[in-house]
Image (spheres, helix red, strand yellow):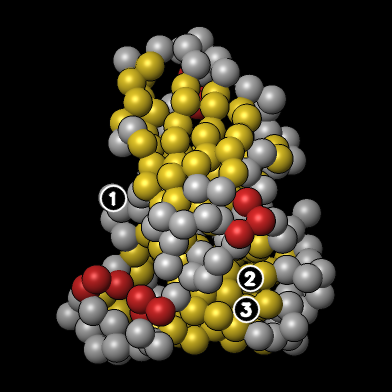
Amino acid sequence: EIVLTQSPGTLSLSPGERATLSCRASQSVSSNYLAWYQQKPGQAPRLLIYGASSRATGIPDRFSGSGSGTDFTLTISRLEPEDFAVYYCQQYGNLPWTFGQGTKVEIK
Amino acid sequence: QVQLQESGPGLVKPSETLSLTCTVSGASVTSGSYYWSWIRQPPGKGLEWIGYLYYSGSTNYNPSLKSRATISVDTSRNQLSLKLSSVTAADTAVYYCAREPNGLDVWGQGTTVTVSS
């Protein structure tokens, strides 16, 4: 099973700042099948990025994904008030599919 | 527009079987090369993938569930179902169904299941 470790656990930033979230895999993710999700309280997760770097439909271009192999990054170029949430990475290239433990982006 | 809606009992007794349904509208569960997954989230915790049913009918499950999970499809109703046997308090969670073409792009709103006597 591929273990995904996200860091930091919590990121305290102000609106307008840049957020950089990390997701490290215990082994190489097949075909870079790595996704990022945003989850707000009481809501289902929302797909932001798939295939490590492709934005999902309707996702603003301030969200970008990068990386390959075992190291992946989600960058939010300028935080908007609605971006404060929990973010999860997920790999779907190897069974069983697994999620990281999440990074909370909170208002400083 | 594809929509998913989970439903089922909100309370299940320990050692019994949890049964949930996911009603799919706007797409057929038996076409389109999609994986239809169940995912759960215990209170205050992260996400855990339970398993999927591929549009062809094949299934795959998370080994952590020790063969307690079964995902099936009712094609006449365009519904997925999840059965989880021998539940304990550790199975208390919000249960989601979701569609995967490349990342989980459509999710239901989730249904809360509490395991308690």
Q: Which amino acid type corresponds to the residue marked 2 in the rendered image?
A: Trp
In the rendered image, residue A6, in percent from the top left (x then y), is placed at 38, 42
Q: Are marks 2 and 1 in contact (CB under 8 Å)?
A: no
In the rendered image, the quadrant that contains the C terminus of chain B is bottom left
For label 3, count other residues whose C-alpha is less than 10 Å away and answer few (under 14), some (14-19) or many (20+): many
- Sequence-wise, which precedes: disc 1 or disc 3? 1
Q: Which amino acid type corresponds to the residue marked 1 in the rendered image?
A: Gly
Left or right? Give the position of A39 relative to B34. Answer: left
Q: Are marks 3 and 2 in contact (CB under 8 Å)?
A: yes
Q: Secondary structure at mark 3?
A: strand
Q: Which amino acid type corresponds to the residue marked 3 in the rendered image?
A: Leu
Q: Secondary structure at mark 2?
A: strand
Q: Which residue position is annotated with label 3? A: B53
- Sequence-wise, which precedes: disc 2 or disc 1? 2
Q: Are marks 1 and 3 in contact (CB under 8 Å)?
A: no
Q: CA distance from mark 3 to mark 2?
A: 5 Å
Q: Which residue position is annotated with label 1? A: B44
Is A81 situated above or below A5? Answer: above
Query: Disc 3: which chain?
Result: B
Q: Which residue position is annotated with label 2? A: B36
Q: Secondary structure at mark 1?
A: loop
